[in-house]
Image (spheres, rainbow, N blue to C red):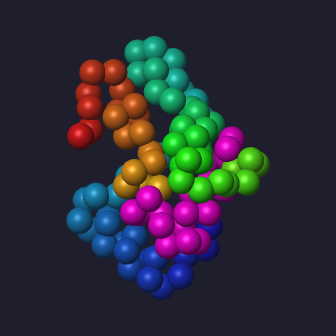
Amino acid sequence: MIFDDSARVRLLGSIEANRLVLLCGAGLSMASPSSLMSAVQVSQFCFDKYQPIAELPEQMRDNLDTLAAYFYGRGEFESIFIGTLVPWNDLVGSGRGLR
């Protein structure tokens, strides 16, 4: 993903404010004891949660990067994708809720 100047400023501000979250990995956290969702499962969850609001292209359902880029391109990455669709409590491991 290529960032414009505005995105770079927000990214650097998030780093400085110690509030940057990166989701990455190769499925290592899916096994016990963490048992976290895979990127495909996160994508499917977000896609399915958004479908009653607006129909998305089916090819986005299994591709988290494409789905995130869609919301970023609409200016809704933070407010909709990160703020309401991502299942944060399911991404922190068992017994440790985020909110």
- Which quarter of the rendering shows the C terminus? top left
Q: Please, which residue is most extreme toward the bottom here? A: 5
Residue in the picture at 34% in, 34% down: 89
Dominant SS in magenta? helix
Residue in the picture at 46% in, 20% down: 35
- Image x and y of residue 19, in percent: 28, 58
Q: Please, which residue is most extreme toward the right here? A: 59
Residue 55 inside the magenta-drawn segment = no
From the viewer's perspective, is residue 53 above or below residue 38? Answer: below
Q: Please, which residue is most extreme toward the top here? A: 32
- Image x and y of residue 75, in percent: 50, 73
Comparing 65 with 82, the one in front is 82
Q: Which residues are magenta?
A: 61-80
Res 25 seen here: no
6 sits left or right of 3 in the view: left
- Image x and y of residue 62, in percent: 68, 41
Residue 73 inside the magenta-drawn segment = yes
